[in-house]
Image: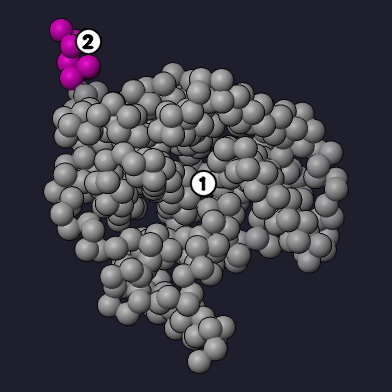
Amino acid sequence: MHETTVLLIEVGALLLVLSLLGRLALRVGISPIPLYLLAGLAVGHGGFLPFDASESFFEVGSQIGVILLLAMLGLEYSAEELLSSLKRARVAGLMDGLLNAVPGAAFALIMGWGWLAAVALGGVTWVSSSGVIAKVLRDLGRLGNRETPVVLSVLVIEDLAMAFYLPILSALVIGAGLLQGATTVVIAVSVVVVILYLALRHGRLLSRAFTSHHAEPLLLGVLGLTMLVAGLAEQVNVSAAVGAFLVGIALSGQVAHNAAAVLSPLRDLFATVFFVFFGISTDPASIVPVLIPALVLAVLTMGTKTATGYLAAKKAGIAVPGRWRAGLVLTPRGEFSIVIAGLAVSAGLEPQIAPLAAAYVLITIISGPLLARIPDATWFKDTVKRRRLASEAKVEAQARS
């Protein structure tokens, strides 16, 4: 058969299967993300029924999925809210880096992989997956929660930190000179500053360039601008996710409201493609030998990431349930971790980093959305309530004595 025909058959069949898996997840009451990942593993490299013709479609679609997820998140918040959240989360961002990068770096040194591998693995365990977390927040209906700005602040700080980290890592692993590495970092940071300035100072002018009354030109305009800025950001070693998020932040008023409505179906489609492609690009056979080390590392760093979100939410004055929601929703790692591992392996560092990172990310992506639901469970709410009442009773007894 013609390659295009095979592509249509593969994509159509997989979308139908994903629809059934989504319905199953809704009926059982779990996130559909783990099921989408397993479907990708089944049809990917080393899977039961490899889909070769459609792989390029899912690869491009996955990149669009991350861009749309972050752009839609940006549409939920104003530039002023972003700026105030970033100011409040500076300490949380520093704490996030220390708590989550150090375990990965220490793990690489313990394994005897050297300091360059330690720098790379520290990045793998440091940065959360903005795409996964954005979908989990939406699926659980938490976009309007008090702790969500704290979560977004941590994510944005991580993504902005990647503007420094990735060029530095690239310069280190390829042995580039100090001047070349510094030049790359300066360019990347300058682009971020320019995008931030335009989003914060001239967002209203940007919104006027779009019509909010006609869906088709609004869809094409916002989608085109988002992908253009994301691509330009990626060109200078800045995360495409950061560019897309800031475009969403820059749009305001009725334009932002209507853009969110017309982009929602596209976001849902390509977000699903993102999770499926991660499964497709992962060879199950390569995961088995490193599964135990990856599991140990995942348990350790999911704990440190939970502590990051909990403490950041506590500093922001969020109640105990919100602190746990903020901490547990931050646990999934994803696209950045895979990019960092691929960069390290392509430069000739420890070859086990790639399968370890794949297994690690897979564990956190599957378990993260499940862990995020724990604070909504009745038994968890009852436990928190009992502890609160016990604490109040203790304080009252001390006051009486």
Q: Magenta region, mostly helix, strand or loop?
A: helix
| Extent of the magenta region | 394-401
- Residue 238 sits above or below residue 201 on the image: below
Q: Badge 1 is on which residue?
A: 143
Q: Is residue 370 left or right of residue 90?
A: left
Circles 2 and 1: CB distance less than 8 Å? no
**C-alpha separation, residue under disc 2 versus residue under disc 1:** 39 Å
- Residue 217 sits above or below residue 71 on the image: below
Crowding around mark 2 (Cα neighbors within 10 Å: few <14, some 14 to 19, many 20+) is: few
Tell me, yes or no, whether the highlighted magenta stretch contains residue 233: no
The answer to whether residue 352 of the structure is visible from this angle is: yes
User: Which of these two is toward me, 335 or 350?
Assistant: 350
Q: Earlier in the sequence, mark 2 or mark 1?
A: 1
Residue 24 location in percent, x, y?
A: 34, 74
User: Which of these two is toward me, 114 or 108?
Assistant: 114
Residue drawn 73% across the image and 43% down it = 251
The answer to whether residue 29 of the structure is visible from this angle is: no
User: Which of these two is toward me, 286 or 304?
Assistant: 286
Circle 2: residue type: Ala
Q: Badge 2 is on which residue?
A: 399
The residue most toward the bottom is: 1
Circle 1: residue type: Leu
Q: Is residue 113 left or right of residue 172?
A: left
Q: Is residue 54 left or right of residue 173?
A: right
Considering the image in quadrants, where does the C terminus appear?
Answer: top left
Residue drawn 56% across the image and 44% down it = 241
On residue 296, the disc is none
Residue drawn 37% across the image and 22% down it = 95
Quarter of the image for residue 174 reads top left
Residue 133 location in percent, x, y?
A: 43, 47
Q: In this figure, what is the number of numbered marks?
A: 2
